[in-house]
Amino acid sequence: MSGIIPAVPREARQGVFFDGESAAAHEVRIVLDEGAGLLLLRGEGIDVTWKLDEVRLVPDQAGQGGLVLRSATAPMQRLFTAHRDLAESFPARHRPVKQVDRGRILRWALAAVASVALIVFVLVPTMADQLARFIPPEGEKALGDATLGQIRGALNENSSIGVRVCRDPEGVRAFDAMTERLAAGVDLPVDLTVTVLDHPMVNAFALPGGHIVFMRGLLKEAGTAEEVAAVFAHEMGHVASRDPTRHALRSAGSIGVLGLIFGDFAGGALVLFLAEQLIEAKYSQGAESDADVFAYSVLAKAGVAPSALGAMFERFRAKSGDAEGLAAHFLSHPALGDRIEAARVATPKGFAARPILSEAEWVALKGICAR
Ligand SMILES: [Zn+2]
């Protein structure tokens, strides 16, 4: 039989379609037609038709939402729907979209950022939590990359490339080793990208797309590799719950996202604003406690006593009030004392700690900004 599959009533399947060109979200009815393909209907006319074997699934990072679909031939369009059962109808849903040349990848990255903006523009910022799971991973990564570039620029206005990234090879190897040991057996929605910036600020923060950024000042201030690992594990907690992405969405929504939509996103006022928001991100007390609790378990798995997090907080507290010692994201709640105590309590009596780095690795890590 050809024609529209009758098993499911036509009105049963709804979706939201973005055409990739305008900011409008189109409510569509979704109809599967064996012959024609996936039909997206608005009103009575057929707006868009995707061939069934060209429909691809965009991974939903949070794993709890509906489907995000795209067509292999129209990379900027997206269809969002709650009807997960639809996925079965697309034989090539997991097939990667064919590799393309660099120019196209760049344009797609820009388009991905624009599509993030479109979604934000269409839906109010209070929906940030629900929206975050619809952002395609490449869009989140592009937003994180752009924000990191902006932060580097903002921290050093005297240089066109901004504040330097520390790349001493032995230091990088030591940090890679720490990353590997902490991330082993931890389920994160994205791969981690760790960056050390050559800046005296005592701070570390997470950005969208799995970026974790340390400042040289924090490495200098830390007394042990375990204290660095504790901050690292805390930031992994923010990555795991995608706090930076939701924070960016909320912040962007509140001032509008026209700058993102009309290009100039790398130098735009919006990304600068986001950079400031994220570098001093003030997450909710709940988000901070969740990241702390996440850190306890990551640390314990890696053989590090959770109390190391409290030890680092003590240092932040001692440094606060110092102009260079800004660690706003850690000091944003008055309950720092409670968090120090909680980290101590989270460490079981007789915990068998083992070093997260060798002595040589710790020395190398401390020297990562030598080059
Ligand atoms: Zn935090």
Image (cartoon, rainbow, N blue to C red):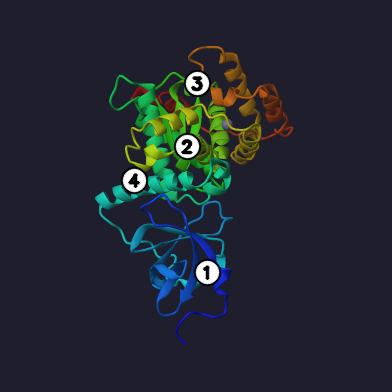
Of badges 4 and 3, the one in the foreground is 4
Measured in 3D between alpha carbons, the distance from the residue under mark 1 to the one under mark 2, in whole angstroms, is 32 Å
The residue carrying mark 4 has its beta carbon less than 8 Å from ligand 1: no
Measured in 3D between alpha carbons, the distance from the residue under mark 2 to the one under mark 3, in whole angstroms, is 26 Å
Mark 2, secondary structure of its residue: helix
Mark 4, secondary structure of its residue: helix
Q: Give the class, few, some or many, for how many residues have Cα within 10 Å of label 2's Cα (few <14, many ≥20).
A: many
Measured in 3D between alpha carbons, the distance from the residue under mark 1 to the one under mark 4, in whole angstroms, is 29 Å
Measured in 3D between alpha carbons, the distance from the residue under mark 1 to the one under mark 3, in whole angstroms, is 49 Å
Mark seen at residue 110? 4
Say which of 316 and 19 sits in front. 19
Tell which circle, 1 or 2, labels the residue nearer the N-terminal end: 1
Residue projecting furthest to the bottom: 1
Q: Give the class, few, some or many, for how many residues have Cα within 10 Å of label 3's Cα (few <14, many ≥20).
A: many
Amino acid identity at mark 1: Leu
User: Residue 224, position in %: x, y?
Assistant: 55, 24
User: Residue 46, position in %: x, y?
Assistant: 41, 70
Report whether 209 appears left or right of 332.
left
Tell which circle, 2 or 3, labels the residue nearer the N-terminal end: 3
Residue on which disc 1 sits: 86
User: Residue 344, position in %: x, y?
Assistant: 70, 28
Residue on which disc 2 sits: 252
Measured in 3D between alpha carbons, the distance from the residue under mark 4 to the one under mark 3, in whole angstroms, is 32 Å
Q: Quadrant of the C terminus?
A: top left
On the question of residue 358 being in view, the answer is no
Q: Is label 2 in contact with label 4 (beta carbons under 8 Å)?
A: no
